[in-house]
Image (cartoon, rainbow, N blue to C red):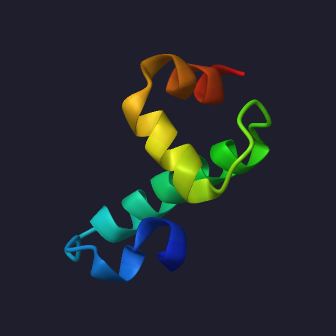
């Protein structure tokens, strides 16, 4: 998780925030790993999802 999302650098430290964001990161990582439409590293898939609305919709809803 730390390599893909740089979790150690996160500034979220109070309350349930760290646990909630860790869960969201795990969900996002699993969705990107399972998606087979785009061949590439997790880093490139994350970048592509950030830049392309259609790609993120494809990852989330298929």
- Residue 12: x, y in percent? 23, 70
Quadrant (top left/top right/bottom left/bottom right) for the C terminus: top right
- Residue 34: x, y in percent? 77, 43
- Residue 56: x, y in percent? 52, 28
Q: Is residue 13 above or below residue 25?
A: below
**Of residues 14 and 51, which is closer to you in this image?**
51
**Horizontal relation, residue 22 to residue 1: left or right:** left
**Of residues 22 and 6, which is closer to you in this image?**
6
Q: Residue at x 48, y 36 (%)?
A: 49
- Residue 55: x, y in percent? 55, 24
Q: Residue at x 52, y 67 (%)?
A: 4
Q: Residue at x 62, y 21 (%)?
A: 58
Count of labels shown? 0
Q: Residue at x 74, y 42 (%)?
A: 39
Quadrant (top left/top right/bottom left/bottom right) for the N terminus: bottom right
Q: Is residue 54 above or below residue 46?
A: above
**Horizontal relation, residue 4 to residue 35: left or right:** left
**Of residues 1 and 47, which is closer to you in this image?**
47
Farthest bottom residue in view: 8
**Horizontal relation, residue 2 to residue 58: left or right:** left
């Amino acid at each position: 998780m730390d390599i893909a999302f740089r979790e150690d650098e996160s500034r979220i430290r109070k309350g349930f925030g760290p646990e909630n964001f860790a869960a969201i990161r795990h969900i996002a990582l699993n969705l990107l790993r399972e998606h087979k439409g785009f061949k590439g590293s997790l880093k490139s898939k994350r970048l592509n999802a950030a830049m392309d609305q259609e790609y993120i919709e494809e990852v989330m809803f298929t």
